[in-house]
Image (tube, rainbow, N blue to C red):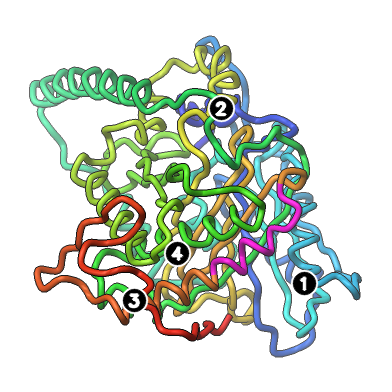
Amino acid sequence: MAGDRLSALDVAFLCLESRTSPMHMGAVVTFRATEPVRADRIAALLAERAARLPRLRRRVRQGWPLGGASWVEDADVDPAEHVDTHRLTARYDPDPLATHASRWLARPLDLAKPLWRARVVTGLPDGSFAVLVKLHHALIDGAGAVETVLGLLDEVPAARRAGAARGRPAPSRSPVDALRAEAAEAVSRITESAGIAGSVLKATRPYPVSPIAATGSASRRLGFARVDLADVRRIRGVRGGTTNDVVLAILAGALREWLLNRGQRPDAGPLRVLVPVSLRGREADRAGGNVLSGYLCDLPVHLDDPVDRLDAVRAAMLRNKQAGPARGAGALPVLANRVPPGVHRVATRLAGHAAPLLFDTVVTNVPVPSVPLALDGAVVRDVYPFVPLAPHHAVGIAVACYRNIIHIGLQADGVAVADIGSLGDAVTKSTAALLRAVEYCPADPAGSPRPVVPGGKRSGGSATQRRPEKVTSLQR
């Protein structure tokens, strides 16, 4: 892989990097230990496996063309220098793992070295241990990060076979057919780029816009939330839609309560979220660490009724899917990948500060395989992913479904958000409210949601008439 050029989008993530906006993704993975944990043994095992992954031996070299960069293999890199250990000692912290991980994840990566770090954390109350990982977004996107982390865990043959299948070469074409295809693709890319740029301009909102914008600080707070997959399936079984639709509706309810708890009124309108969409498997060109597009979706935090929120999310995501991942303002990553790297060096930092004009937060879904995962025989228990905060964003949300639990990683600006735990609690309450509501408000016979009328209530009855008196809480 030595000498591989960074794509324009990869360069853009490097250009967005700053002390207050480090552009690395993160994960907190906990393991159920059946015997005393030797942190040094786990760290040595991670370093040994990292040495086998070419991607983790590369660093960035600035070069030509102007503003461009390439990956070069660092022959002197010692993966053991990228893996360390820590034992928790805080006795009175309500969540010592989250507190420690917040400080660790807040520290930027050294851009002169391979862009990753890992830490083994012991001293958890139940004798289990955790592995913290951070990978720069210039190195890889969320889907690629999962493949990389799988390489650090005990072997998963099914997952590795799937990765090998995705890497099969495309059928060969004649020179004439290849030239025609390239010309058609060039015209298509120009047309798409113009459409995306126009959509971005139309979607830009006047300043100030976001009720959850932040001035930006280097401090971070992490929160963990869990949702039972069986509850999400029950909701889908009654109202339809996808698992992602239900999760977005749950998050809409959680953000609504969180805003109210912060003394803010969510009635002014929805919160707009950027939902990244992986294009891996859709595109033959696999160059670059990121193969991304995105959707913009309005989370209806202004609606009081949980079912109304779910119906609104379903409708919004259906419109996005019908338009496709390469259209609309949400396809900003596609547009960024078509801008010369030199332009990113000049304009990307400024454009990043304008992110709140386009969207309020990011909600990304990280694809974790459903097979049992382990490290040195210790079984994976929880997988919490974390998405980097864009400049002036107070909160970023990442979702991963592992086995029967949907894990939600919440990352917040530590100065702007004093208590990220309240948002995690709101996720649990929002799930319970939506689960209860759908049991008393089944879908129409045709399977389509009923229209929402002004005021947040559907035609055909009020939300209050459908609600029982008692709310049953979910197991965390």
Q: Which residue is mark 3?
A: 465
Residue 215: percent from the left, percent from the top?
A: 70, 32
Query: Looking at the image, is mark 2 or mark 4 earlier in the sequence?
Result: 2
- Give the x, y percent position of residue 50: 63, 55
Task: Tell me, yes or no, if residue 151 can be seen here.
Answer: no
Q: Read off the magenta span.
A: 417-427
Q: Secondary structure at mark 3?
A: helix
Q: Which mark is residue 208?
A: 2
Q: CA distance from mark 2 to mark 3?
A: 37 Å
Of the image marks 2 and 1, the number of the one nearer the N terminus:
1
Q: CA distance from mark 3 to mark 1?
A: 59 Å
- Whole-Å distance between the Cαs marked 2 and 4? 26 Å
Kind of residue indicated by mark 2: Pro
The one of 16 and 377 positioned closer to us in this rendering: 16
User: In this rendering, which labeled residue sits more in front, label 3 or label 4?
Assistant: 3
In the image, taking residue 33 as reference, residue 406 lies left or right, namely: left
Q: Looking at the magenta stretch, what is its main secondary structure?
A: helix
Q: Is residue 2 left or right of residue 236?
A: right
Amino acid identity at mark 1: Arg
Numbered disc 2: secondary structure:
loop
Q: Earlier in the sequence, mark 1 or mark 4?
A: 1
Q: Nearer the viewer, residue 317 or 347?
A: 317
Q: Position of residue 55 (x, y in %)?
A: 55, 45
Q: Residue at x 71, y 34 (%)?
A: 216
Residue 41 is labelled as 1
Amino acid under label 4?
A: Ile
Amino acid beneath label 3: Gln
Q: CA distance from mark 1 to mark 4?
A: 40 Å
293, above or below 223, in the image:
above
Q: Which residue is mark 4?
A: 250
